[in-house]
Amino acid sequence: MQRLTMLQSQAALTHPINSEHSKEYKSKDLQLLQNATEKAHEAIMIMEGNIDVMTRLQSFYRELLRTDAFIKGVNLHTPQPQPEVILEQHVTWYNNQLDSMISDMRMIISRAQLLVKISTDRSSFVSHP
C-alpha cells in the first residue's frame, strides 16, 4: 500500500496535470490529511510525556540505590546474603527495559515528525497550485 501511494505520488509529480496519474483533490481530502496530522501531533506529545515519566522513574530508582537508609532497610528485612546486590541487579534490569522503551518511543516520534512534515508539505502543495 505504501509503495503504491509512493508510486502514485511520483507519477502525479512527473506527469502532466491532465494525465491518468493526476488526481483532483477535494476539500474532504485535505480535511482528512489535516485530521491525520493533528492526531500525529497529539501522539508525539503523548509519547514525549511518556518519555519524561520513564526518565524520572529511572532517576528515582538510581537515587534510591544510593540511599543508605534504603539499603539498610533492605538488609534488615531480607534473609538472603547481600540483598543490595540483588536489588541493584533488578533495578539495573528495570532501567535497561526503560532505556529500550525510551529508545523505541524516540524512533516512533521521529517517524511521526517525518509524517507530519510530509503531510504538511503535500497539503501546502495541493492547496496552493
Image (cartoon, helix red, strand yellow):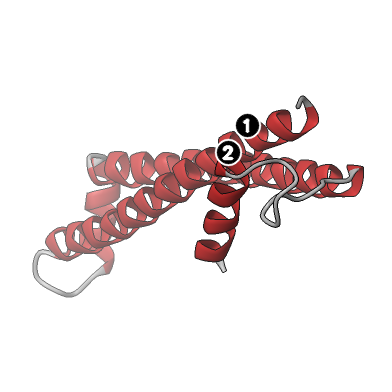
Q: Point out which mark residue 118 bears.
A: 2
| Type of amino acid under label 2 | Ile
Q: What residue is rendered at 10% in x and 64% in y?
A: 82
Quarter occupied by the C terminus: top right
Q: For the N terminus, give its image quadrant.
A: bottom right
Determine the residue positioned at 80% across, 46% down: 35
| x then y, percent, for residue 42 | 69, 42
Are the residues tagged 1 and 2 within 8 Å (C-beta)? yes
What is the number of the mark on residue 49? none
Question: What residue is shown at x 9% (from left), y 70% (from top)?
Answer: 81
In this picture, residue 8 sits left or right of residue 89: right
Q: Nearer the viewer, residue 75 or 124?
A: 124
Please give left or right for residue 30 compared with residue 116 in the image.
Answer: right
Question: Looking at numbered disc 1 in the image, what kind of residue is underneath it?
Answer: Asp
- Measured as percent of width and height from the top left, residue 6 is found at 53, 55
Seen from this angle, which residue lies furthest bottom? 79
Q: Circle 1 is placed at which residue position? A: 121
Within the image, what quadrant is residue 115 found in? top right
Is disc 2 surrounded by few (<14), some (14 to 19) or many (20+) residues within 10 Å?
few
Other residues around mark 1 within 10 Å, as few (<14) / some (14–19) / many (≥20): few
The reply, left or right, for residue 103 in relation to residue 113 is left
